[in-house]
Image: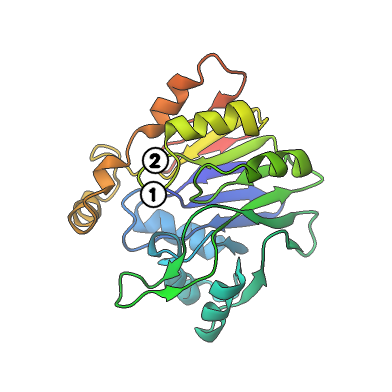
Amino acid sequence: MKITRLGHAMLNIEYESLNILVDPFYSMNPGSSEEELKQYMESANVALLTHGHFDHTEGLSFIKEVNPKVQVLAQYELALILLNEGFNVMPLNISGTMKAAETTVQMTMVPAMHTSSYQEIHGNPTYAGVSCGFILESDQEETVYISGDTGLTVEMKIIQDLYEPKVAILSCSDILTMGAREAEYAIRHLLDVHTVIPVHNFPTEEEAKRREVLDGLKQSFPIVPMMVRHDVDLKERLKDHKTNVKIVGFGESLEL
């Protein structure tokens, strides 16, 4: 399994023979270059959407141009919106599972505590159902829990008990998701994983591949500078814990 960080919440996961793209974010994504993003969008087999907010779906229109056959998995209400826009969408709802053809990979939608709307930066937002996370299971790889933009929720304990993930990709940026304090609690009391990858932190000026995009994002959304380096805080908080906190930089990959 190879996990590549492409944005604050955008990931590519090579899982068996699949390239699974999580929460595609393109034109306003300062974390990766356009060339990197295009490469992963063109090679994706599946796109998982945790909710409808622009920083998790804005890249879909570009994917439709370069890779229109990609299978999009989304929560029911969001899926209906995207079906009307011509996407190849498979609707799921909480606890629903889809098996990827010609693989042993199963993708299960799990609860997340967060809001969801679509096209919210383009006039009136459209209600997009509830937010979600995903469990990835395979006969050949370890089970992965993708939390999405969740707040702290007791459902994580059920997710751990039922699916037994070994790797957690956990939101940890505060303001709009869990911060380091809540993510620490989740690891110590709700999840039993050997590796946690904190995400949803935006790049600093030094980390941004596209500085002009970051500057525009900060101008439009003044909260963005508050959502940096909480992953470092989580690593410090868990330095005495058995779970390994792996901070994956933008454009970097982690092989497990």
Point 20% across, 57% down: residue? 216
Point 54% across, 60% down: residue? 131
Residue 178 percent coordinates (x, y): 45, 41
Q: Which residue bears the numbered disc 2?
A: 173
User: With respect to residue 108, does 199 lie above or below?
Assistant: above
Point 54% across, 13% down: residue? 240
128, 84: nearer the viewer = 128
Are circles 1 and 2 on residues that touch, CB within 8 Å? yes
User: With respect to residue 58, does 219 lie above or below?
Assistant: above
Residue 56 percent coordinates (x, y): 45, 60
User: With respect to residue 33, does 179 lie above or below?
Assistant: above
User: With respect to residue 117, does 32 lie above or below?
Assistant: above
Which quadrant of the view contains residue 194?
A: top right
Which quadrant of the view contains residue 28?
A: bottom left
Secondary element at tag 1: loop
- Considering the image in quadrants, where does the C terminus appear? top right
User: Which disc number belongs to residue 176?
Assistant: 1
- Considering the image in quadrants, where does the N terminus appear? top right
Asked whether, in this view, residue 42 is left or right of residue 200, the answer is right
